[in-house]
Image (cartoon, rainbow, N blue to C red):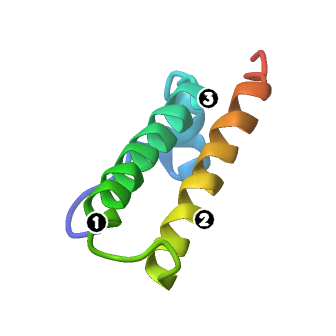
Amino acid sequence: MDGMTLSPEFKTAAAFAEARPPQPRVAILRALFEARFAHLQALSDEWRGQLPESDWRMRLLHKALYSTWADLRDLEQAKEPVS
């Protein structure tokens, strides 16, 4: 590893992951999906006047928006496991 050595307790990625403090996974995923949703909305707004709604690119954008919205909805229903 180019002269880098890991301390003995972090010989595996699993050991390193267990040593890190737990992060709120739902909050991280929610931020990711919200950023994706905002980006897709901006793309849709940008291309709305330039492409007809029946164009395959607009349909793909609408499907991606719906998919991201559904992910956000499902995430709201999920509960963070208690550790």
Question: Quarter-wise, where is residue 31 in the image?
Answer: top left
- The residue wearing badge 2 is 63
CB under 8 Å between callouts 2 and 1?
no
Disc on the earlier residue, 2 or 3: 3
Q: Nearest the camera: 12 or 27?
A: 27
Residue with the mark numbered 1: 49
Classed neighbour count for the residue bearing mark 2: other residues with Cα under 10 Å, few (<14), some (14–19), many (≥20):
few
Q: Which residue lies at the image location 21% right of the left edge and 69% below the top edge?
A: 2
Q: Please determine whether, in this image, residue 40 is positioned above or below residue 52.
A: above
The amino acid at mark 1 is Gly
Residue type marked 3: Val
Q: Is residue 14 above or below residue 3?
A: above
Provide residue 72's location: percent of width, then percent of height. 63, 37
Residue 42 vs residue 1, the one in the foreground: 42
Q: Amino acid at mark 2?
A: Lys
Foreground: 65 or 81? 65
Distance from the alpha carbon under mark 2 to that under mark 3: 23 Å
Q: Where the C terminus falls, by quadrant?
A: top right
What label does residue 26 carry, if any? 3
Which is closer to the viewer, label 1 or label 3?
1
Mark-to-mark CA distance, 2 and 1: 18 Å
Q: Residues within 10 Å of mark 1 (few under 14, many from 20)?
A: few
Please give left or right for residue 49 compared with residue 76 in the image: left
